[in-house]
Amino acid sequence: MKKYIIYYTLFISLFALAQEKDTTIVFKKRVLESTEVDFLNSYYNQKGNHSAVGGGIGSEKLSDFASNITVAMPLNDDDVLTVDIGISAYSSASSSNINPFNSSTTGASGNTTTSPPKGTPWQASSGASKSDQLIGLTANYSHSSDDRNFIWNADVAFSNEFDYTSIGFGGGVTKLFNEKNSEISLKLNAYLDQWRPIYPTELHEYGTYGSNFQYNGFLRGVTILDQGGNATTAYLPNKFKNWTSTSRNSYSASVSFSQVLTKKTQFSLFFDILKQEGMLSTPYQRIYFADKANYYIGIASYIPIYETSNNIGVYQLADDVERLPNSRFKLPVGFRWNYYINEKFTLRTYYRYYWDDWGINSQTASIEIPYKISDKFTIYPTYRYYVQNASKYFAPFEKHLSTEQYYTSDYDLSTFKSNQYGFGVNYTDIFTTTQIFGLGIKNIDFRFNHYNRNDGLSANIGSIAFKFIMQ
């Protein structure tokens, strides 16, 4: 799994009817009465044994802490500016193994000390790539018509981490009709992203020094082993080439329709069209070919048990990095159906079907049943089921052939099923009677979810959000 970092943005818009007499508006309620401030903190951790950096095997341990602040400010009766700032900090055993070799035994120049360099896909290395931070900023401007039946919005976004920068912009329109019982929306977005590629250490050295890479840089003086544990100079990953184009552009169009059917029933339909172009591969995810000999750095005695977690002393050198087409077309469609059972229970359901031209088809279904304990407290158990088939470019560790044009061993693109169980607790005080530093607490929301899928990946995520109203 790549980074599995989960990001949250809480946007709240309050719409009211404009009261009219003849053609003259005698009263118009503000779209947003007061400035609202949302604070969100979340913690995520996972474990698994199919690291994409390790070519489909190895530890996927990852932990991530994310924090967001969202401020929605009324500019006048009709316009709202919403700004979201977020930061996410993670530590990953998988990405740490971009350079898996113990840095305490090998200097930057490749000169070794008394112990040979070693590594293992089953443990985190001490390299700089084991942790990173992502910083993001989004600004959204929305305008509502006098009768509140038409809204348009525009947004811009920016995010950055060590090896990746994203710039996005977009906008949308929403039309309400049938006495506001019907709603249709259209949204367009574009993201213009840029990689700063980081390659696995052994391939980086080959790309830098060519066929003499074993006598220069990091690998100078380092013993390379063959499958039998013997020293060799035969390792030559000549399938590898540096990426020449490192941009990734994504475009999306989203259409949704919502309808209130009865006093108790509401449903919505949606579909998206998404197109990606450019460098869609992840440049530090290794590939091992079945028709190529195996080579290692580390302790020879661990080679026979390389694919087990008992291997704590040897790392296999890559044949290439992940290669995927430079375009991808995605088409998800789905619906939501909500039913008010009584004053205590509500039923919320969701279904989505997804298709793309890389050969993946998937289905998602979820259910949430909020139970209102009191006027202020609600609890809600949740369940989500997901199933997908593999991309035509996926194969497990050492199952690809060097004659193939495209290849990946990222298990996010494999066949799998997953289940997610969770619950939440929500506190709401519309009168904001409790205050902190002059800010009234309108809402507190806590959620916890446990995720597992049948390839061995499991994760937990907890989040807590606070909504304040400036008095």
Image (cartoon, grey):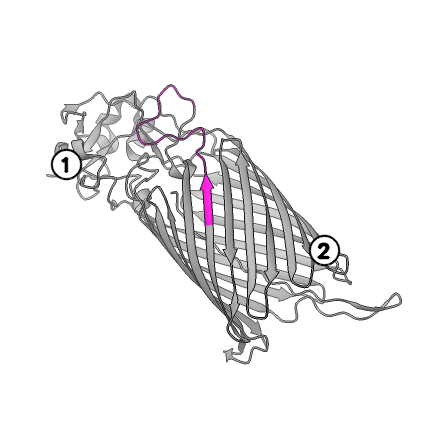
* Point 24% across, 34% down: residue: 218
Q: CA distance from mark 1 to mark 2?
A: 69 Å
Position of 141 compared to 57: left or right? right
Pick whichever, 361 or 409, lies toward us.
Answer: 361
Pick whichever, 95 or 370, lies toward us.
Answer: 370
| Magenta-span inclusion, residue 395 | yes
* Point 30% across, 42% down: residue: 49
Residue 226 location in percent, x, y? Answer: 18, 25
Q: Is residue 1 above or below residue 64?
A: above
**Residue type at numbered disc 1:** Pro
Which residues lie in the magenta part? 385-405
Task: Indicate the quadrant containing the N terminus: top left, top right, bottom left or bottom right.
Answer: top left
Residue 198 location in percent, x, y? Answer: 37, 37
Residue 182's disc number: 2
Kindly tell me whether residue 64 is visible in this rendering.
no
Kindly tell me whether residue 313 is visible in this rendering.
yes
Residue identified by numbered label 1: 116
